[in-house]
Amino acid sequence: MTDPRDTPHLSSVQLQSLRQDLQDQLERRSRHILGLRAEAQEGSGADDTWQELLVSLTAADRAIAELTKALERLADGTYGLCADCSAGIPFERLKVRPLARYCIKCQRRYEAA
C-alpha cells in the first residue's frame, strides 16, 4: 500500500494559499485574544460581562490551538489528508473549512455517530 503523501493532491500554489489563510486567521485570533486578556485584567469580575469574557477567552484559546495544529500538519505533510481514512480532502473544502480534518464521507459518518 502506498503512502498518500507520495501522491499529493494539493498543488504548491494551493498549499501556499491555505497556509496564508491559516496564518492570517492565527494572527487575527492572537490579536483578539490579547484584547480579551487586556479587558479581563481591567474587569472586576462582578457581572455577567465577566462570564462572557471567560467564554470568549476559552473559545479563542481553542481556535488558536486548532490553527496551530493545522499549521503543524501543513509543515509535516499531513494537512489535507483525512484523519480517519487518509484520503485527500479537496482544496475547495479546505478553502471553506481550513481546519477540516476529515473528508466528507468520514465527517458524515462521524456526525451520524
Image (cartoon, helix red, strand yellow):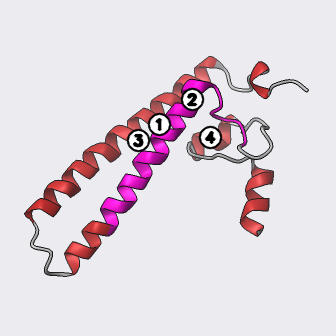
Q: Earlier in the sequence, mark 4 or mark 2?
A: 2
Mark 3 → mark 2, Cα distance in angstroms = 15 Å
Q: Is residue 57 magenta?
A: yes
Give the SS element for disc 4. helix
Mark 3 → mark 4, Cα distance in angstroms = 14 Å
Q: How crowded is the residue under tag 4: few (<14 C-alpha within 10 Å), some, or many (20+)?
A: some
Write down the residue under mark 3.
Answer: 25
Percent coordinates x, y for residue 6 in the rendering: 78, 19
In the rendered structure, find residue 74 and report the number of the disc placed on it.
2
Q: Earlier in the sequence, mark 1 or mark 4?
A: 1
Mark 1 → mark 2, Cα distance in angstroms = 10 Å
Is mark 1 in CB contact (under 8 Å) with mark 2?
Answer: yes
Q: Quadrant of residue 9?
A: top right
Number of numbered discs overlaid on the protein picture: 4
Q: Earlier in the sequence, mark 3 or mark 2?
A: 3
Q: Amino acid at mark 3?
A: Gln
Write down the residue under mark 1.
Answer: 22
Give the SS element for disc 2. helix
- In the drawing, does residue 91 fall left or right of residue 74? right
Q: Nearer the viewer, mark 3 or mark 2?
A: 2
Write the start and end of the magenta stretch as one range.
55-82
Q: Quadrant of residue 113?
A: bottom right
Give the SS element for disc 1. helix
